[in-house]
Amino acid sequence: MADWIRCKRGVVLGSLVPLLALTLAGCGITGGEVQSANELAGDNARSIWNLFVPIFWLSVVIFVLVQGALIWAVIKFRYKDGDPPPAQLHGNTKVEVAWTIAPAIILAVILVPTITTIADLASEPDDPYTIDVIGHQWWWEFDYEDDGFATGNVMHIPVDQPIRVRMTASDVIHSFYAPQLFGKQDLIPGRETNIYFTAEQTGEFYGQCYEFCGVQHANMHFRIMVHEQDEFDDWVASQQAGALEPEPDTLEAQGKEVFFQPGAACHACHAIDGAVAEDGTEAIGQVGPNLTNLGDRPIIGAGSLENTPENLRDWIRDPHESKPGNEMPAFSQDQISDEDLDALVAYLSSLR
């Protein structure tokens, strides 16, 4: 019998190991970084954290008191042979009033700072820099309307500048969330919602769609790059200038031709600002992300892959291998040869 028990215990523990490994594998995102709400880099996130911490510790105190009283009561008043039936509290007005008023007071104490924080986060700051965000299945569009350009999946902002993120969705409800910078906010088709925040330090910050939006919800990431003001101004100027024209008779120039050729027809779905084919066709597609600065982006496929030439090549050949269900079609060798694909990757990687 003892051997059988040990065998069953080994089977159970052995089955938990792969389950634990699978659970831990889901704790990170592309690039191995973790989205942490307590590594604060924005005023919006700091306000939420400052509200959460005292409520958390108040909850801990209440939990300890309630559980302590429960354990004490179980031990002290445990049944013994010969004990009479316990007294019933039903109808005891004093007790019922006490355990109704006490939670009400606790909730009232929590209510005041909660409403104050919500009101503060909903207040538009003076002279914010506005970025329009559109959620798609399953990628993010960032439109810098005042500066006349758009990009995808990677947002660039200046440090210490109030930001207004003006949001909507093109298909289903999404949720915009970068825990180090700001709290989550839904994007709703046909409706405008807003987030106001100021980044307090430069760096690269990770975000995620937080509302289940389809089979690739988990692969709907974004990055926020926070720059010093001068560096951000240079980035804006480079976007307004459009894509650089590749040098003639180079692999990149050949790749640009592939971008417009009928077999690929990338321009039908993607825009590249300033890119024009020899016959005058412009790259102004709106179905997929704008690719003007693709070479600068750390991710492709809305964070499903790191942006490397090898991953970009695999993504173009068969995007459904890494992100099943997305709207980009796979391209066979009959549509894009290996040679043309290498040239196209070289051209797209040069877009900076």
Image: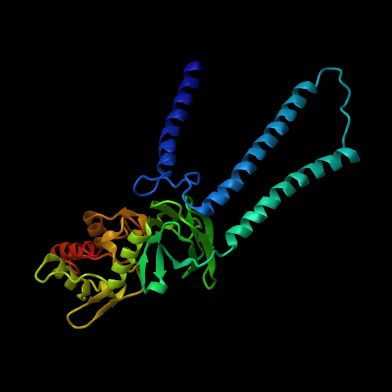
x 50%, y 21%: residue: 5
Q: Quadrant of residue 132?
A: bottom left
x 39%, y 52%: residue: 202
Residue 106 located left or right of residue 9: right
Residue 158 located left or right of residue 55: left
Residue 340 located left or right of residue 48: left
Which of 113/103 is in front? Answer: 113
Q: Quadrant of the C terminus?
A: bottom left
Decide: is 91 above or below 299: above
Decide: is 246 above or below 32: below
Which of 269/41 is in front? Answer: 41
Instruction: Report if residue 291 is visible in the image.
Output: no
- In the rendered image, residue 51, in percent from the top left (x then y), is placed at 61, 47
- In the rendered image, residue 336, in percent from the top left (x then y), is placed at 18, 67
Q: Quadrant of residue 23?
A: top left
Which of 233/131 is in front? Answer: 233
